[in-house]
Image (tube, rainbow, N blue to C red):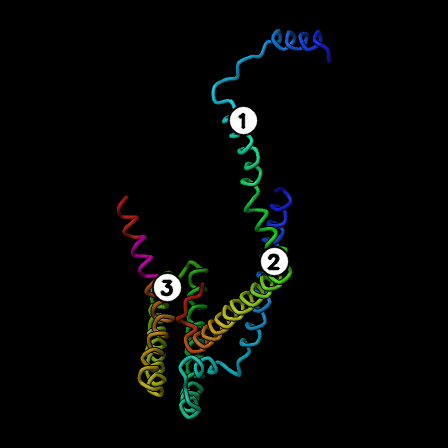
Amino acid sequence: MNIEDSKLSVWLRESRATPALPSRFQENVWRRIESTAAAPEKSGNWLDALAALILRPRLAFAGVALLLLTGTLLGAQSGVQTARHAAQMRYVAAVAHEFTDRQ
Amino acid sequence: MKRSLLILLAALALGAALFAGAYFAAHRASELCCARPADDLNWLQLEFHLSNAELARIRELHEGYLPQCAERCARIAEKKRELDALLGSGTNATGVPVKQAEIAALRAECQSNMLAHFVAVSQAMPPAQGDRYLAEMKKFTLGAHEKIEQSMSGDCVHEHSH
């Protein structure tokens, strides 16, 4: 590079207009970068985690077993109560059918 | 996110279906299994924890009472038919109160025999169970009439307030 070229470079650099940056420009840029990175994680986070948890085979089998067991126990208990009530009504109807509450 | 939501909804639906299926199957099975007692007194023995000797004594009372009860019920039914015939003909209105009084007298006789039977059965049980038995029978027999009377008197108050 000769002297003429370096002069030209200096001259060109000085002639280029550099706009002034707004105040706290750098801070604002970092804040936007951080909020963009955090946003998708916040909205889908717990749903994704729960879905992933449900899809784990061990937990899925445990859940199914628990539901079947609870349903069976509660259903059996309710069935026994219904049968007992029906038997009670049969006895009452046999000994007092003129005075029972026929609803 | 949408996929996760779909997975959760599908899991919820599947869980609800599994629970409901197990519940209703078990309900039906135990209902069928327990709903075939040997006779009417099977419930009595289970409910009031009766020994075989106590049950035998109660069976004796029960079998002695049932034919009398059936005979009184037949008489009440006959009187009811007669009352219906009188009400249907519309000519002999004076006979209606007489027939109603006859039915009421038969019902009173039936009721006092029924209460005597309940007392006799309760005495054949251990005291605590006997008291519970009497309370239960009162609830299902006299209690039903009390409910009707209370609702009727409530209606009357309602009617008169207008």
Please name whichever residue, B43 or B162, is drawn nearer the observer in this view of the structure: B43
As measured in the structure, the alpha-carbon distance from the residue carrying label 1 to the one carrying label 3 is 100 Å
Disc 1 vs disc 3: which is toward the camera?
A: 1
Q: Position of residue B48 (x, y in %)?
A: 40, 81
Please name whichever residue, B148 or B121, is drawn nearer the observer in this view of the structure: B121
Residue tagged 3: B96
Please name whichever residue, B84 or A25, is drawn nearer the observer in this view of the structure: A25
Total marks placed: 3
Which residue is at a point 53% across and 30% down the rendered structure image? Answer: A30
Labels 2 and 3: the sequence-earlier one:
2
Q: Position of residue A34 (x, y in %)?
A: 54, 34
Q: Given the image, what chain letter belongs to the residue carrying mark 3?
A: B
The picture quadrant where one finds residue A5 is: top right
Q: Residues within 10 Å of mark 1 (few under 14, many from 20)?
A: few
- Label annotation for residue B103: none
Q: Quadrant of the N terminus of chain A?
A: top right
Q: Is residue B151 magenta?
A: yes
Please name whichever residue, B40 or A18, is drawn nearer the observer in this view of the structure: A18
Q: Residues within 10 Å of mark 3 (few under 14, many from 20)?
A: some
Q: Secondary structure at mark 2?
A: helix
Residue tagged 1: A29
| Labels 2 and 3 share a subunit | yes
Q: Secondary structure at mark 1?
A: helix
The stretch in magenta equals B148-155
| Residue situated furthest front in the rendering | A3
| Labels 1 and 2 share a subunit | no
Residue tagged 2: B17
Which residue is at a point 65% across and 8% down the rendered structure image? Answer: A12
> Which residue type does callout 1 highlight?
Val
As measured in the structure, the alpha-carbon distance from the residue carrying label 2 to the one carrying label 3 is 59 Å
